[in-house]
Amino acid sequence: MRLSEVRRILGAEVLTGEELLEKVEALSVCGADLMSDVLAFTKEQTLLCTGLTNAQVVRTAELIGLCGVVFVRGKRPTEEVVAMAAQRGLPLLSTRYPLYETCGLLYTAGLPGCGDKPSDHGCA
């Protein structure tokens, strides 16, 4: 699913990476606030949905090769974190939906979770 579609489904605000939304594709979605879980259970091209807004989210995304981050509950990271993501080419979005609903909307629209058919999209 392209990030432009994610934006539409979630009515999300783009914080950085607007020019990438048509190019970047998410193969799965992960909802987590523990970056240790993200490290353990996701692979490249996973879209992370989280309530955390600190720099560790961007560092974790870069380390794994996540395709983007959606901040839930209308949360927004600091300008410093947004600049860090922009420098790394990591799209950041913000949605008003809570974490559960965000993941549910994306799953209903066809984006699998990391536990669905691991052989299809490389998730654990």
Image (spheres, helix red, strand yellow):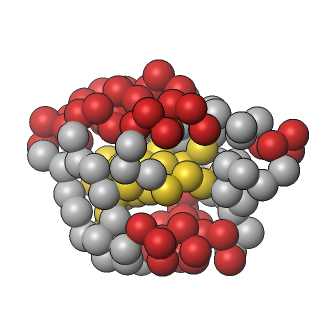
Residue 56: x percent and y percent?
Answer: 29, 32
Q: Quadrant of residue 59?
A: top left
Tell me the residue at 38%/43% (across/down): 34
Which residue, as the protein is rendered here, is positioned at the far top? 63
Q: In this view, does 111 lie to the left or right of 68?
A: right
Q: Quarter of the image containing the N terminus?
A: bottom right
Residue 10: x percent and y percent?
Answer: 46, 74
Q: Is residue 108 left or right of residue 14?
A: right
Tell me the residue at 37%/77% (across/down): 97
Which residue, as the protein is rendered here, is positioned at the far left? 79
Q: Quadrant of residue 43?
A: top right
Q: In this view, does 78 lie to the left or right of 67?
A: left
Residue 2: x percent and y percent?
Answer: 63, 56
Q: Quarter of the image containing the C terminus?
A: top right
Q: Quadrant of residue 123?
A: top right
Relative depth, front residue between 65 and 36: 36
Tell me the residue at 50%/39% (across/down): 38
Q: Is residue 122 left or right of residue 73?
A: right
